[in-house]
């Protein structure tokens, strides 16, 4: 007998408006992340002692459907975050089969996962917000603790697979790690591979 897919959910944040996706969204925060960013604002998303609930896609659907009218009225839906939501790509695919195609599904991802997971997510996610940190390999590695290779390869393959309007790349200014010039270089590299939508931001340090 096949075991039901489950995923560790830390929290569900309801009634978010235009902060992480179009319309009204519920943000589902998964546990687990392959990176260790120096200024991570969600370290609980990979801490081993974080409180979380293992849920099936059906159980998650039962929780978030309370806001279905808001999603439908505003073109919103569910944004999957974390942590790294693409680690839960099979779960999200099953969730999509349950919720149908009237809800807008987004993922906030680092893309630092095996390609197979990105491909699965691409089959069921409407919009990807990719936090690429910086396209300079040295800056990326100093900031995340991992090499840039996986993220860069996945991004190139994803832009081959999906129309550019389904991908937004976030380009942060990260104090002590990159500069405006670095960010401009990243933007140029990303434009050259076909990225058309950018979201520039500055990480606020505590
Ligand atoms: S990808 Fe996000 S959750 Fe993971 S370490 Fe970096 S900032 Fe934290």
Image (spheres, rainbow, N blue to C red):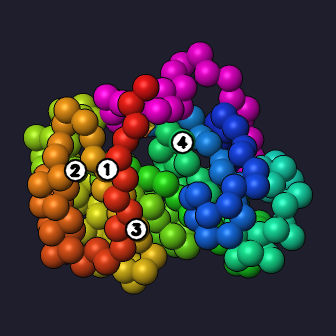
Q: Is mark 3 within 8 Å of ligand 1?
A: no
- Mark 2 vs ligand 1: CB under 8 Å? no
Please name the residue that numbered disc 3 is placed on: 168
Whole-number angstrom distance, CA of label 2 to CA of label 3: 14 Å
Does the stretch in magenta take in 40? yes
Residue 70's spot in the image, x, y percent? 82, 68
Which one is earlier in the sequence, the residue at label 3 or at label 4?
4
Question: Residue 138 sits in which quadrant?
Answer: top left
Please give the residue where the numbered disc 4 appears in the rendered image: 82
Mark 2 lies on a secondary structure that is: loop
Distance of label 4 from label 1 (alpha carbons): 18 Å
Alpha carbon distance from label 1 to label 3: 13 Å
Q: Residue at x 61, y 21 (%)?
A: 50
In front of the other: label 3 or label 4?
Answer: 3
- What SS does tag 3 mark? strand
Which residue has dot 2 on it? 134
Mark sitting earlier along the chain (2/4):
4
């Amino acid at each position: 007998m096949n075991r039901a897919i489950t995923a560790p959910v830390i929290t569900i944040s309801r009634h978010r408006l235009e902060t992480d996706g179009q319309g009204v969204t519920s943000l589902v925060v998964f546990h687990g992340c392959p990176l260790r960013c120096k200024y991570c604002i969600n370290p609980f998303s990979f801490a081993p002692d974080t409180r979380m609930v293992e849920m099936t896609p059906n159980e998650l659907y039962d929780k978030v459907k309370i806001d279905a009218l808001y999603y439908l009225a505003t073109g919103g839906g569910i944004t999957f975050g974390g942590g790294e939501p693409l680690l839960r790509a099979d779960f999200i695919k099953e969730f999509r089969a349950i919720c149908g195609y009237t809800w807008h599904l987004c993922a906030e991802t680092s893309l630092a996962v095996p390609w197979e997971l990105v491909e699965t997510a691409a089959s069921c996610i409407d919009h990807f917000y990719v936090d690429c940190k910086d396209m300079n390999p040295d800056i990326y590695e100093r900031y995340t603790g991992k090499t840039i290779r996986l993220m860069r390869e996945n991004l190139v393959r994803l832009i081959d697979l999906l129309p550019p309007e389904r991908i937004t790349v976030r380009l942060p200014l990260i104090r002590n790690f990159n500069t405006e010039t670095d960010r401009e270089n990243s933007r140029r590299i990303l434009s050259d591979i076909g990225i058309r939508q950018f979201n520039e931001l500055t990480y606020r340090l505590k």
